[in-house]
Amino acid sequence: MTSILMVDDEQDFLDSIKRMLRIEGYDELTAMADPTRVEALMADTKFDVAFLDITMPGMDGLELLRRIKERSPETECVMLTAHDSIELVIKAIKMGAYDYLLKPVSPEQLTHVLDRALERKRLLASLLLRSEQAFEKMLDHPEAFGDIVTNNKAMLRLLHEAELHAVSDIPVLITGETGAGKEVLAQAIHKASRRAAGPMVAVNMLALSPTLFESEFFGHAKGSFTGADREKAGYLSKARGGTLFLDEIGDLSLEIQGKLLRILQEGEFVPVGKTQPEKADVRIIAATNQDLAKLVAQRKFRKDLFYRLQFAHLDLPPLRSRREDIPLLATQFLRQSTHPEATISEEGLDVLAAHDWPGNVRELKGTLEAAANLASGKVIKPEHLRLPEAKARSRQVQTDADDRKLRPLADVEREHIVAVYRAVGNNKSQAARVLGIGLQTLIRRLKSYRIP
């Protein structure tokens, strides 16, 4: 059932709108004359469409629009005004309003704009559902990969391949740039495997020295060397029945590479100070941000170890090659931040999309967490992101403002007509109405501007 909110300080107008909607079969209607009460109402109620008067005492429609979009971005808002103010209409549309209506409103106008707003809402919901269904259909264990959000086809194929490898015990090699999410993918593979009930132990291989490798990996018996005052379980024992994640494997010394290879080949190990071998009941997942094939050619990585790892090779794409995932990741990270109520503006998303993210997903997460703090948990704007693109955007805005101070009238007119045309979704009839000019006049202007 469609839920509709109407906010207008003129009670007679509210009653009129309400009657029109009831005649059209809409019953879930909420009419309010006091805009200051809407925010409290929306704490418990979500609306599909909201009709908002622009000029109201206590709080104007633009401020109410901003607050509604912050709390419920999926609510389609239609502005109502008795004054055909181009500036206010364009500002409202830039703030997220779907459309506007001039008072007095006829039943035909009301139902027409409502039908289009609901169609847009259904379309967006359908697109989201299709992306979720694609994820569900692609994977047999989508819950295991729940921490990875994507609409990128290459990324979805990679996750499908990862799930296929998860069912066996063969070693997996995950490559990708720093911050691309290699450990998150390793955790997902573990959760999708038959070893999910066992532990997953992560080891930073950079922290291991050749002299301590056997003790740390295999464990040692009490008294096996000076300082071994008690028996210690190694990583292989701690991960027994589960998964051992070896990060930064490309930085291992050749000596340690040889010892690791023996574990993969023989499937057993002997703790330091003991004589009886123990079974290495673990699944190995290795990760690196280096090109192992190149290291093999340079004789910095053992060819035999590389061949043992490369059969199940997953190469994570960098964030800059799947920019369509940035809004999804931004939403996820904000929900997980200390300010889960924070949202990000369209301008903020534009800045995120323009950045190349050398630190990948990890950099995006840190940027958003810091921005949410600077925005005090409210709407994140470009100035909160502290990215080079945001600073450049700010400088460009100032330059544009300076340039507009002294410009030919024809340039200003062209910019204004094009801005209105774009703001109303390239709808010529609506743009002509907003601009207060004839439709044919607008068509001639657009043709002269070479705008299709």
Image (spheres, rainbow, N blue to C red):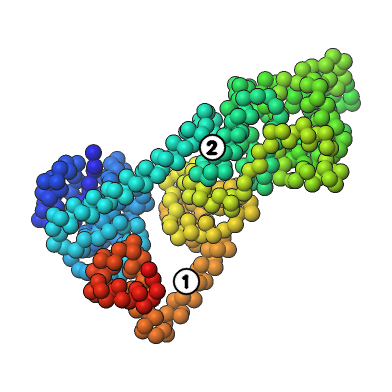
Residue at the outermost right position: 226
Query: In the displayed structure, does residue 22 sit left or right of residue 316?
Result: left
Q: Secondary structure at mark 1?
A: helix
Q: Quadrant of the C terminus?
A: bottom left
Residue at the outermost top position: 276
Viewer-nearest residue: 291 or 349: 291
Q: Is residue 100 above or below residue 292?
A: below
Kind of residue sitting beneath label 2: Asp
**Alpha carbon of mark 2 to alpha carbon of mark 1: how far?**
37 Å
Residue under pointer 1: 397
Kind of residue sitting beneath label 1: Val
Residue under pointer 2: 147
Which residue is drawn at the image coordinates 67% and 47% (left, top)? 177
Label 2 close to label 1 by CB (< 8 Å):
no
Image spot of residue 56 (x, y percent): 21, 61
Image spot of residue 269 (x, y percent): 81, 21
Viewer-nearest residue: 343 or 414: 414
Query: Is residue 38 visible in the rendered structure shown here?
Result: no
Query: In the displayed structure, does residue 138 sit left or right of residue 260?
Result: left
Q: Secondary structure at mark 2?
A: loop
